[in-house]
Image (cartoon, coloured by chain):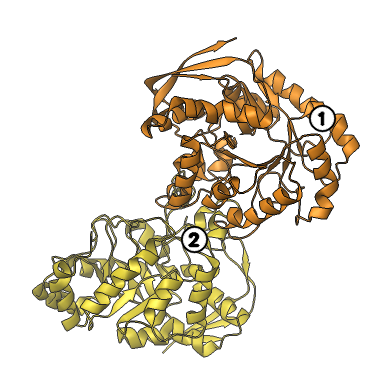
Chain colours: A orange, B yellow
Amino acid sequence: MQLTAPLDMHLHLRDGEMLQNIAKASAQTFSGAIIMPNLVPPVSTKEEVIAYKERILAAIGDEKFTPYMTLFFKPSYDKAFLESVRDDITAIKLYPAGITTNSEGGVSGFDVEELRPTLEAMSELNIPLCIHGETNGFVMDREAEFVSIYERLATAFPNLKIIMEHITTKESVAALDKYENLYATITLHHLLITLDDVAGGMLKPHLFCKPIAKRPEDKEALLKVVLEAHPKVMFGSDSAPHPREAKEACGCAAGVFTAPIVLQVLAELFENEDAPLENLQAFISGNAQNIYNVAPLAKTVTLEKKPFTVPSDYNGVVPMYADEEIAYSIKEITYG
Amino acid sequence: MQLTAPLDMHLHLRDGEMLQNIAKASAQTFSGAIIMPNLVPPVSTKEEVIAYKERILAAIGDEKFTPYMTLFFKPSYDKAFLESVRDDITAIKLYPAGITTNSEGGVSGFDVEELRPTLEAMSELNIPLCIHGETNGFVMDREAEFVSIYERLATAFPNLKIIMEHITTKESVAALDKYENLYATITLHHLLITLDDVAGGMLKPHLFCKPIAKRPEDKEALLKVVLEAHPKVMFGSDSAPHPREAKEACGCAAGVFTAPIVLQVLAELFENEDAPLENLQAFISGNAQNIYNVAPLAKTVTLEKKPFTVPSDYNGVVPMYADEEIAYSIKEITYG
C-alpha cells in the first residue's frame, strides 16, 4: 500500500527540548503539516513565525518536510500586518480564551463587528481561519454549542475559508454541508475512541484530549465522512505531546500523541472498514491540497501488513497504542 | 449544628491492611453503615459474613459503630440459606457482572424467572435488595438504560424493597416516585461534581468513580430530592478507598474516598442551599431508619463553622478535597 505526500493539517510540535524530541516523528512520514502556534507566548508576530519555522527546520535535520506556519489569532491584526506576513503563513488559528493548552490569550465572545476588520482582511488575502470550536459549557456539549458560532462567522464572512479543527460531533459534521465556506479536520483518535475508552473502564489519561472523545453516534458520523473522503474533510492529527509525567499526574494534561503511528493505523482502519485506498489518499492529502491550495513535496510512504509493536515512549512521550501491536508497518519512504 | 445517629447506607471498608487504614474514618463519626460485600472473593456465605464483621469490629477498636452486613447477591441463594443468614445481614447487594471494582461474579441478564426464587424468598424474609444499576452500555447512558431493569424488578416483586444505589441521573430520580418499592441512596460527591469536574479541565483521577459523574441537570435533580429530604432517599457515601498509586496510575481505579469529610461538607452544602437542618437529619439518618427499620446506636456529632484543612491522605488514601480548606469542622462526638 502506498500513500503519496501525506499531510497533517493540525500538528503540535511544541518548542525547545520537546520539539527536538518529537519533530522527526512527523517529519519522517509526512510531506508537511500545519503547525499550531500555541507556544508560550503564542506565535503572533512575523519575527516569531520566522524564528519558530527555523527552529522546526533545525529540529528535523535532514528530513524532507514542510512546516506550514500559522499565527495565533488576535483581533488586533490589521490588514497591513497581515499583508506583511502573508507569505510566511498558511493559516491563522483562533482559540477561544482558556479552552485548551496555552490558549489563555485567545478570543472571548465572538462579536462579528469586533472581528470584522481582521476577518475581512483575511478573506481578501485568502488566509484560512482555523478554529478550535468549543464553548466553555459542559464538556460533552462544548463543541455542539459552538456550531452556532461557526454558522455566524460562516454567514458573516462568506469568502473566508473557515476550518473547524478536530471536529468530534455529529453536529459539526452536519454543519459542513450547510455552509460552503466551512471545512474540517478530523484526528485519528476521534475515529477510534469514545468517552467509553477514556472513562468507561479504568480512567485512561493517555486518551484524554480536548475536545474530549464523544458518543458512539458521533464517532460513526466522523467515520462516515472520512471513509467516503468527503471533499471538505482533511486529516489533522492534533498529535499533542506531553511528557509522561504530565499525562500520568494527578491533574493530567490534555492531548494524544499519535504522530508515529498515524499512517499505519489509518491503513488498518480503512482496510477493516472496506474503504477504497483512493479515499484514504484523498483524506490524507488530496483534499487538503485542494482546500489549502498547497503543493506538497513529493514523498511516498509504502506500508506493509506486518505487525509492529508500538514503543513504550518516544523520548519520554507515550504514544497511542504504546506497547501494543498494530497490523501495519512502514516499509519504505521514497522521494521525488 | 448537631446531627444525631448519622448512617452511611453504602460504604466500602475493603479488607486486610486497607480495612485497618480506613475503617476508623467512618466509625468515628457514623453510628453505622451498610457494608459492601465486594471483597475478593465476594462475601457470599454465612461464615464469610460473620468473619468479615469480626474483622471490621477488630479494625474499629473502641469506636461505637454498627456494621450492617450484606451478602453479594447470587441467584443460587435459596430460602433455606436466606433464613439461616437472615439475622446476620441487613441487605443483599446485587452487582451486574463486571460493572465495577470486584464485581466479576455478578448477575448477567436480568431474567425475572431465573431470579424469582431468590427474590421471592428475600421478599418474604423482608431482606432489602441493593442494586448497582448500570448496564454495560455507553458510560453516560448506563444508569439511565438500567432504569427499565429497576422497573421490571419493582413490578415483578412488589413486596421487595429495592434500593437503587448511588443514583446519578434524573431518570433514576424520576423512577423513585413511580414505584412504591423503589428507594435510593445518593453519595456526597454526586451532589457536588459533574463530568466537567472529572474531565472538563485537567483530568482528575481522584474524582473518577462509577457511576461516573453526569450532567449538570442530573446533579440538580439529585440535589433537589436530597435538600427536600425526599423520604425514599438516604445518604450512602460509596466512599471507596484505593491506594494513591492505584488512583494516580495509567489506568486509574474508580472510587472517591469521602468518609472523613462527609458530615462537614454536607453541613456546608445544606447551609449554602438554605435547606433546613431537619432535612439534613432526615437524609443522613431518619429516612434510612424508616426504610431499613434499623435503630442505630445513639451518637451525636457537633459541627462548628471553623475552617478545616483536609489532610493530603489518610494512611495513603487521598480523600476528596485533599489539601483544601472546607468550612466546617467536627467539634465533638458524644454518645448515649
Q: Are marks 1 and 2 on the same chain?
A: no
Residue B91 in view? no
Up the image or down, A297 lies above or below B49; here it is above
Mark identifier at residue A137: none
Mark 2 lies on a secondary structure that is loop
In which chain is the residue bearing label 2? B
Contact check, label 1 and label 2, Cβ < 8 Å: no
Quadrant occupied by the C terminus of chain B: bottom left
Q: Where residue A321 sits in the image (x, y, percent)?
A: 44, 34
What is the three-letter code of the residue carrying label 1? Arg
Rendered residue at 56%/59% (across/down): B196
Q: Which residue is mark 1?
A: A86
Q: Relative to the observer, which residue lies in front, A303 or B219? A: A303
| In front: label 1 or label 2 | 1
Residue A72 in view? yes
How busy is the neighbourhood of tag 1: few (under 14 within 10 Å), some, or many (20 plus)? some
Q: Where residue A304 sits in the image (x, y, percent)?
A: 40, 18
Quadrant occupied by the N terminus of chain B: bottom right
Q: Where residue B320 sits in the image (x, y, percent)?
A: 53, 63
Rendered residue at 88%/41% (across/down): A78
What is the three-letter code of the residue carrying label 2? Tyr
From the viewer's perspective, is A25 left or right of B108?
Answer: right
Q: Which residue is mark 2?
A: B314
How busy is the neighbourhood of tag 2: few (under 14 within 10 Å), some, or many (20 plus)? some
From the viewer's perspective, is B65 left or right of A165?
Answer: left
